[in-house]
Amino acid sequence: MAVMTHKPGTMAAHSRRTFAASVAIAAGLALSQAAAAATFTVNPTQVFLSSTTRSALITIKNETDKPVRFQMRMMAWTQDPSGQMQLAPTQDIVFFPSLLTLNGREERRLRVGAEVPTGPVEKTYRLFIEELPPAESVQAPNVLLILTKVGIPIFLQPARLTTSAGLQDLGLKAGRFSFRLVNSGSFHFMPRDVRVRGLDQAGAAVLDQKLDAWYVLAGGERVFDLEIPANGCARIRSFVVEAQLPNSTLKETLQAPDGACAK
């Protein structure tokens, strides 16, 4: 288990990157295609609020020459063990405006602010910025209009940011290997890499697989489960799991129990 303490706001630098969202209109014809594109940018891509930073600004810019309309919604954000987002309406974070029209090349700022106090564990939200259809549009036959919706993570950070993470419950049963990546710290992290290796008696790799990883929110976990190929499972004598976190690396080993490959 890795434990580390950070000062509030140390992750704010990540919010300086610009996120570009694209909207495309594609027309499919018998022998040809016609396409037009409208693009808007959002900056920053993450918002960090705290007891000392109660509000922030988000800039939306229309990168096209035509008007673009938007609506905004705020949702409380949690995740299930598979990493899927769980969303619910909330009034913890307020924002203005909720509807917006940007003329060509115009940019506007949204203001978001916390309406609830910070707690011992980070609270997480997403501001969804959704493009609306043009106010006046004549849609040609066989034209598909694709509208973009982006979700900006908003983190209401506690006064003390601590990282506490662990790999738990490594197991092999009926040819399936599983484990949990647990975040018992006070704020989220994003693993840079999660890797599973299956080694034979001589220590050679029979299996070497990287797993997709996303946010692991404070107090949450990710459950990983993968099927081991039958032709290799019986040769594996141990499993090694490594998870590279932003400031540490977790590593755990499981000796493969006899008969665990049988299905």
Image (tube, grey):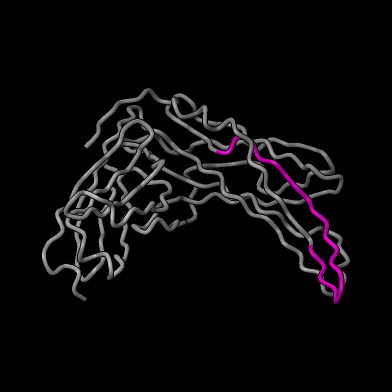
Task: Give the farthest residue toward the left.
Answer: 258
Relative to 259, residue 171 above or below: above
- Give the residue drawn at x 38%, y 34%: 246
The span picked out in magenta is 26-45
- Horizontal side of 3 relative to 107 (left or right) equals left
- Horizontal side of 46 relative to 179 (left or right) equals right
Location of the C terminus (image quadrant): bottom left
Front one among 28 and 73: 28
Relative to 16, residue 75 above or below: below
- Give the residue drawn at x 82%, y 45%: 64
- Magenta highlight on residue 76: no
In terms of secondary structure, what is the magenta stretch mainly? strand
**Residue 212 x, y percent position in the rendering:** 42, 53
- Give the residue drawn at x 25%, y 50%: 204
Relative to 27, residue 191 above or below: above
- Give the residue drawn at x 32%, y 49%: 220
